[in-house]
Amino acid sequence: MVRVPLSAVDRERGAVLGRLLRQARGTRSMVQVAAAAGISVETLRKIETGRVPTPAFFTVAALAGAVGLTLDAIADGCVGRHDDGERPLAG
């Protein structure tokens, strides 16, 4: 199976996701948040720095719960909304 290269939009969304998670983590350490989410510290580091711009859904869901974000807040932050409240089409 050949993986399609990520677009610039995909990479930017990954960077935004990383910033959202880093901000929501606040003063908690990566170790604390990774343990709460059930993932490795290295995985969290890669997501926060944008090196894994498209993490698995369940990883994002676990991280959202660990840092107190809703999936809607993450989606709004990463995808944004048009002025009419509708989400733009992905990618």
Image: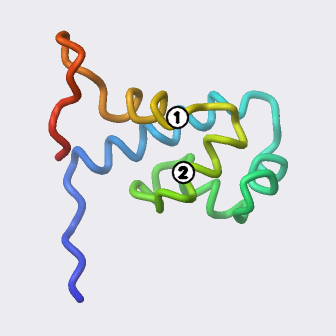
Front-lying residue, 70 or 63: 70
- Which of the marked residues, 2 or 1, is nearer the chain's N terminus? 1
Q: Amino acid at mark 2?
A: Val
> In front: mark 2 or mark 1?
2
- Distance from disc 2 to disc 1, alpha carbons, whole Å, reads 13 Å
Instruction: Say which of 50 and 74 sits in front.
Output: 74
The x, y position of residue 74, in whole percent, is: 47, 34
Q: Residue furthest top?
A: 83
Residue 90 at x, y = what percent? 20, 43
Q: Residues within 10 Å of mark 2 (few under 14, many from 20)?
A: some
Residue named by callout 2 = 60
- Circle 2 SS class: helix
Q: Secondary structure at mark 1?
A: helix
Viewer-proximal residue among 44 and 56? 56
Residue 78: percent from left, percent from top = 37, 34
Q: Amino acid at mark 1?
A: Arg
Q: How many marks?
A: 2
The answer to which quarter of the image holds residue 3 is: bottom left
Residue identified by numbered label 1? 19
The quadrant the N terminus occupies is: bottom left
Residue at the farthest bottom position: 1
- Which picture quadrant has residue 13? top left
**Image position of 24 with respect to 47: above or below:** above
- Residue at the spot x=42%, y=42% of the render? 15
